């Protein structure tokens, strides 16, 4: 069911499922990889922190996408945070059923 949110703008719609961000967060909570990926693709911008949530989900669910996503996330981290040094990067933790990511320093993603 769609409701026109703004009578002056026919392109703005609100669905019963909520915004893409709400559906993304709900999919992360439910550990639903496909739902999180679909919602992330619908979002205009995925913050570094939100992308980390998807990366953690990939790790927990042992997704084959994890390695590539981790490399992309680290690349984004390096580009978006100008106060990092090469020594701040460490080897990623092995995939497991328990996400035990322990950053070497505080991440203000």
Image (cartoon, rainbow, N blue to C red):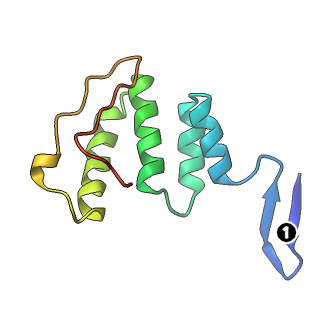
Quick one: 53 or 9, which is closer to the camera? 53
| Residue 12 picture location, percent across and down | 77, 70
- Judged from this view, the residue extending furthest toward the front is 106
- Residue drawn at x 33%, y 50% is 107
Residue 63 seen in render = no
In the picture, measured across the screen, residue 11 lies left or right of residue 2, that is left
Vertical placement of residue 15 versus 10, above or below: above
Vertical placement of residue 102 versus 44, above or below: above
Quick one: 4 or 77, which is closer to the camera? 77
- Judged from this view, the residue extending furthest toward the top is 97
Quick one: 64 or 52, which is closer to the camera? 52
| Residue 49 picture location, percent across and down | 44, 50
Q: How many marks?
A: 1
Vertical placement of residue 75 versus 97, above or below: below
- Residue drawn at x 60%, y 44% is 24
- Residue drawn at x 39%, y 25% is 99
Task: Quickly name the residue at label 1.
Answer: 5
Quadrant including the C terminus: bottom left
In the picture, measured across the screen, residue 29 lies left or right of residue 91, that is right
**Quarter of the view holding residue 14:** bottom right
Quick one: 35 or 47, which is closer to the camera? 47
| Residue 46 picture location, percent across and down | 49, 56
**Quarter of the view holding residue 61:** top left
- Judged from this view, the residue extending furthest toward the left is 87
Residue 41 seen in render = yes
- Residue drawn at x 16%, y 47% is 88
Where disc 1 sits, the SS reads strand
In the picture, measured across the screen, residue 22 lies left or right of residue 40, that is right
Disc 1 crowd rating (10 Å Cα; few below 14, some 14-19, many 20+) is few
| Residue 74 picture location, percent across and down | 26, 48
């Amino acid at each position: 069911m769609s409701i026109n949110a703004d009578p002056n703008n026919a392109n703005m719609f609100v669905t019963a499922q909520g915004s893409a961000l709400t559906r993304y967060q709900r999919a992360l909570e439910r550990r639903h990889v496909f739902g999180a990926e679909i919602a992330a693709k619908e979002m205009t911008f995925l913050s570094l922190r939100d992308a980390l949530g998807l990366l953690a989900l990939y790790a927990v669910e042992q997704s084959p996408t994890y390695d590539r996503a981790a490399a992309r996330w680290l690349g984004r981290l390096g580009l978006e945070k100008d106060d990092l040094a090469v020594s701040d990067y460490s080897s990623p933790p092995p995939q497991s059923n328990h996400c035990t990511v322990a950053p070497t320093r505080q991440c203000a993603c």
